[in-house]
Amino acid sequence: MKIPSLPLLQKYRGYLGWPLASIIISLPLLVLVVIPQIRGLIATYNQINEAKNQVNSLKNKDAALESVNLDSYRDNLNLALAALPLQRDLPSSLDQILSLLIQNKLQLSEINFTNPNSSQPANGTKEESYQIKLGVVGQPTALRNFFNQLKDTPQVMKLTQLDISGERGDLFNAEVTINSFYQAPPQLSDNLFQEVEGLSSQDLELLSKLQRTVPAQVTVPATPLGPRGKSDPFK
Amino acid sequence: MDKITINLLPKEIVTQELDKAKKNLLTKIAVILLVVLIVATSAILAARIFQKQNLDSLNNQLAGLKSKISALKDQEELTFYLKQRLTTINRLKSDQDQKATQSYNLITALTPATAKISRLSLDKNNNIILTVEIPDVYVMQVFFENLISPKINQGKISKVRADSLSKTPSDTYRADLTIFTQ
């Protein structure tokens, strides 16, 4: 079989030496080295950026945690726990309510408790509450003062339902439902990169308010000390 | 005067010279491209080595910081618990969350001094069910105006429903109202 001659190739044979050699070297270099390395370069650049962000985030967190004064924070946590206990603190709630009733010269005609959230397990993600239902007799202004002072009690309590009747001359009969709040300890996430939130001006304001209202002797021990009687009056 | 140029070289030599020039140009281009490619490859490899060192250093830094932060677990727990608790307390103590007290204060402020509240109930939605004894029509007008005028009640009342209105034997008016708060 006769191979057809390539007159064009014959003609330009002299021109093709270096360009051909260049292509033969360049192509594998491009395909096997340059392109994979450029891809790697981009991927590593992203990794470096991510690592830089992580380092910055951890540096900030470290600085924030280093600046925490453990004693002062413990005192503040004790104040916060007096306001929002870890578990139902009925004696403290009652003590504060009765003080307010006496202060406003209101008579207590009945009292009972219910716990609307008792069936739910306490997981610390959300606050829980139990209800204190009071029957109160007194002057309308005294009642108003009682409701307003209830907002400022050391322990977080909220007036949720109210039924007042003024059938007894100047005295009003009031059925008052107050929710008293508590919150189990929250679960701290294992994520090291979780930011540390500092105390806002609102938090500091609240703490100074709590310092004024929470009695000085209130401290919350990490573990209950000694016999404390029935821990849950609802059971 | 026009210039006159005369090329006395034979035509074949001119063609050969032109071919040679083209060949040289092609060779130069090929060599330059090859050199550029080799230099670029070397630069990329150098950049990769530099990146690797940079990444290793950052990873070391990261590991150091992680162990440092793990050692500060007590501080982290304390700040987290405190912040979370204060946020909850702030929310619960906020005016938005003390609506019942607000509703009660609102009604007692809007009720004229001569009108007598004989029954007041707050339901779970903080709507107010009110029975009030009013001495005369003028006071009644003032009271209703207080309830329905957004300027006076600061827009806190969305709707007032009069369930009943009657005149008592003692010539006073008795109104049963349901007041819907916002």
Image (cartoon, helix red, strand yellow):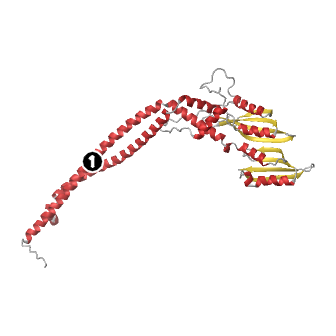
Q: Is residue A99 above or below residue B113?
A: above
Which of the 4 image quadrants contains residue A58?
top left
Q: Is residue B153 above or below residue A15?
A: above
- B170 lies left or right of A121: right
Residue B160 visible in the shown view: no
- B16 lies left or right of A169: left
Near-viewer residue (A104 or B40): A104
Q: Residue furthest right?
A: B169
Near-viewer residue (A15 or B7): B7
Q: Residue furthest bottom?
A: B1
Identify the residue at horizontal 12%, vertical 63% (top origin): B20
Mark 1 nearby-residue class (10 Å; few <14, some 14–19, many ≥20): few
Which chain letter goes with mark 1?
B
Near-viewer residue (B11 or A76): A76
- Residue A26 lies, in percent from the top left, at 23, 53
* Number of residue marks: 1
Which of the 4 image quadrants contains residue A225?
top right
- A144 lies left or right of B23: right
- Residue B1 lies, in percent from the top left, at 13, 79
Check the picture and name the quadrant holding the C terminus of chain A.
top right
Identify the residue at horizontal 39%, vertical 46% (top origin): A46
Residue at image mark 1: B43
- Residue B151 lies, in percent from the top left, at 73, 54
Q: Amino acid at mark 1?
A: Ala
- Residue B112 lies, in percent from the top left, at 81, 49
- A196 lies left or right of B159: left
Check the picture and name the quadrant holding the N terminus of chain A.
bottom left
Identify the residue at horizontal 55%, vertical 28% (top origin): A71
Residue A172 visible in the shown view: yes
- Helix or strand or loop: what does disc 1 sit on? helix
